[in-house]
Amino acid sequence: MLTWMTVTNHRKKYQIGNVHILNAIRETPTTSNVSTTVYKWAGTRGPFKIRIPCGECTLTRDVILDTLETELAGVKTTLKTRDWLSTWWKPLLKGAWHTPTVMVNGKVVSQGEAVNHGLLSRHQLSLSDS
């Protein structure tokens, strides 16, 4: 069962379960141990705008939420979803070139394909213990 989750979407905040989900528009500080960031294929940069939705990005988000809800229910986690085109330099500095990019505490866990829930769980649990 989920204990708490904050979802921020276009300046609205919803409390749902065990995960803080923060939109790139507004971030609130948390006291969590593990920070997970997902860069999805979306965003704007100057005259350019991504209008084609990314199926793997949506699948990655759903896999992460399900993993945090079921396998990592006791781990306090912050999940940030960011648009890739609006903040393209942040994942590139970490060596991530393809969306969807999943980073756990600044380390690239997955890129270019839907994240594997076992791999995500392993990284989350190893960082929550330290």
Image (tube, rainbow, N blue to C red):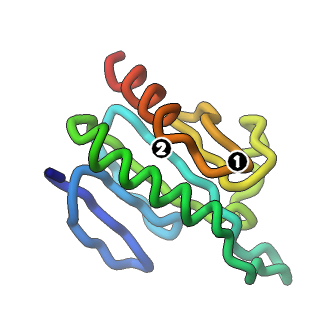
Q: Secondary structure at mark 1?
A: helix
x 79%, y 73%: residue:
45
Residues packed near mark 1 inside 10 Å, few (<14), some (14 to 19) or many (20 plus) = few
Tell me the kind of residue under disc 2. Thr
Vertical relation: 60 (above or below) 46: above
43 over 66 or under it: above or below:
below
Secondary structure of residue under mark 2: strand
In the displayed orientation, state which residue is furthest to the top: 130
Q: Which residue is mark 2?
A: 36
| Closer to the camera in the image, 114 or 35 | 114
Which residue lies at the image location 74% right of the left edge and 80% below the top edge?
52
Q: Any mark on residue 60, and which?
A: none
Q: State the image coordinates of residue 95 (x, y, percent, origin top left).
A: 77, 36
Q: Is residue 122 left or right of residue 73?
A: right
Q: Residue furthest right?
A: 47
Cα distance between the residues tagged 2 and 1: 14 Å
- Residue topped by disc 1: 90
